[in-house]
Image (cartoon, grey):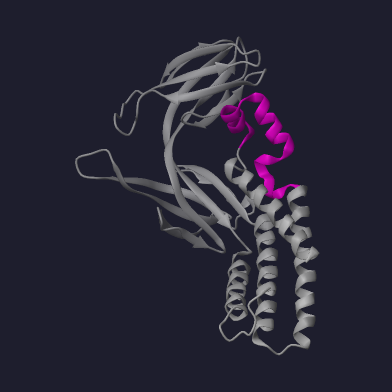
Amino acid sequence: MILVVAAMFTLSMILAAVLVGGLIPQGLPSEVYIDRFGEYLARLLLMLGLDDIYRTKGFFLLGLLLLVQLAVCTGKRVLMLRGNSKLWAAGSVLLHIGLLVFLVSTAVSLWWGKSLMVEVPEGKTTELTKQGVPFDLRLDRFLIEYYPGSHSVRQYRSDVTLLLAEKEIKQASIEVNSPLEHEGAKLFQMSYGWLLEGSVRQLPDGKAEPFSILNGGWFRAGVNQDRVRAVIMGDPDKHPSKNPEAAFLLLTESGDRQAAVVAQGTSEAAGELEIRFDQIRRYSGLQVKQDPGIAGIFAGLTLSLFGLMIRYAPLGGKKDL
């Protein structure tokens, strides 16, 4: 009974950590947390590792403790099975073995699985092999289908080419709810938008530093690494323009704010920076997932469900734990 109570307590702690991980977005750049939660709270979250809670030492130790507790509990039921030929005993063993397989497979997914969000510009290649994915990705074309007579999006699609060592290995289309799978990796169509491209130069005679940033996103520039936010004026999808403008907000470490509106192909000064806006480019937001533990997770759930059905079957002979 003590072992069961201890296991339930450990499981409760894990569920609490999962709840925190569900409330706080995981694996995002630090600038996103600062923008969303403010400077001090964001720094605290980052210091505690709550931005990647499933890879913290505390979460790992909780999982290891639950694994040991479950293994001891499973061993006791295996010993019980030797002197008990009733069906419920076999079901109890299967249930616990299934939970062990599920727990180990989940750990494999958390520690060795990958989940990347990439924004691929149209006509450009993203080198995913540098991040452990078995191919690079080129976005050949991005298409949006609208409902007739409106600007409401019906469907959007990415026509992509997979490459390995610059050699084309596969061409395919990715749509919402229609992912692409290759060599154990899956690509999901998640979003789309615009990239702003240009350069920033420290005044009076600094070297130009190129940038390519999502519409509404932040980047750092200049000798002081000030934060700069870039936003396209208007909606290029609904109101396309041959000469778009972009607004840039400069936020210094001291809290000073400077703003500039820059037309495509021109430069403007914002504080001690000169910002040049060259062009906007369509991008496709894709999620890349590799999950080596997924087969074990389903196998463990299947074993547990089968064991649970035997354990509490009408002919099992015993209903209490």
Q: Nearer the viewer, residue 164 or 109?
A: 109
* Snapshot quadrant of residue 135: bottom right
Horizontal placement of 56 versus 247: left or right? right
205 in relation to 22, above or below: above
Is residue 148 within the magenta segment?
no
The majority secondary structure of the magenta stretch comes to: helix
Numbered circles on residues, count: 0
Image position, residue 97 (x, y; %): 69, 74
Horizontal placement of 54 versus 1: left or right? left
Image position, residue 30 (x, y; %): 64, 33
The quarter in which the C terminus is drawn is: bottom right
Residue at 55%, 12% in the rendered image: 257
Q: Nearer the viewer, residue 167 or 270?
A: 270
Image position, residue 31 (x, y; %): 61, 30
Residue at 38%, 23% in the rendered image: 233
315 in relation to 298, above or below: below
Q: Is residue 135 visible?
A: no
Highlighted range, magenta: 29-56
The quarter in which the N terminus is drawn is: bottom right
* Snapshot quadrant of residue 253: top right
Is residue 44 within the magenta segment?
yes
317 in relation to 136, above or below: below
Q: Nearer the viewer, residue 211 or 188?
A: 188
* Snapshot quadrant of residue 316: bottom right
